[in-house]
Image (spheres, rainbow, N blue to C red):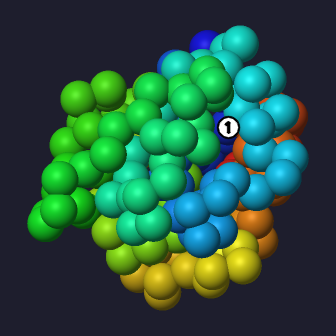
Amino acid sequence: MITESIPGFSDIAISHLVLDYNGTLALDGVPLVGVRERIESLSEHLTVHVVTADTFGRAAEALAEWPVFLTVLTPGQEADQKATYVQTLGSDATVAVGNGRNDCRMLSLACVGMAVTGPEGAASPALLSADITCPDIFTALDLLLHPNRLKATLRS
């Protein structure tokens, strides 16, 4: 668990990290170099979940040895499925990270929502739904690995 008291924002106690796959931690279905190490470090403190429409059909193979729970969504209403996933875990104990239109609801429901722009860009509604916008997945994960950075960004 990661806990932090953020003045003017909230006292947070994070148990879960929910990540989109393509465009967030992977490009063209292949995980970005350097992401796995950060997720392995975070998995010592959080339960890490990857929830994806799996556009390229590579997530299961790519993440087979990673310390994550993978959920491949059924086609159609992916945004609703992602939102329900976050609600089931407990929105108040979950950080969500994504870049697409289908990530908007989970970003807004999570106690902290992070939109990443990355090499695939980000849908404008995702940026508006997030508490934080990060230039890439590395920055987003590093905010959790170094919670004072998260506090500095979100405090009033």
Residue 103 seen in the current view: no
Kind of residue at disc 1 = Ile
Seen at 41% across and 58% down, the residue is 57
Q: Residue 47: x and y, percent?
A: 53, 20
Seen at 68% across and 40% down, the residue is 7
36 and 107: which is toward the camera: 36
Seen at 84% across and 52% down, the residue is 33
100 and 124: which is toward the camera: 100
Residue 3 against residue 127 in the figure, above or below: above
10 horizontally vs 90: left or right: right
Residue 80 against residue 5 in the figure, above or below: below
Residue 48 sits in quarter? top right
Residue 43 seen in the current view: yes
Task: Read off the residue under disc 1.
Answer: 6
Q: Residue 106: x and y, percent?
A: 35, 53
Residue 82 against residue 22 in the figure, above or below: above
Q: Residue 123: x and y, percent?
A: 48, 83
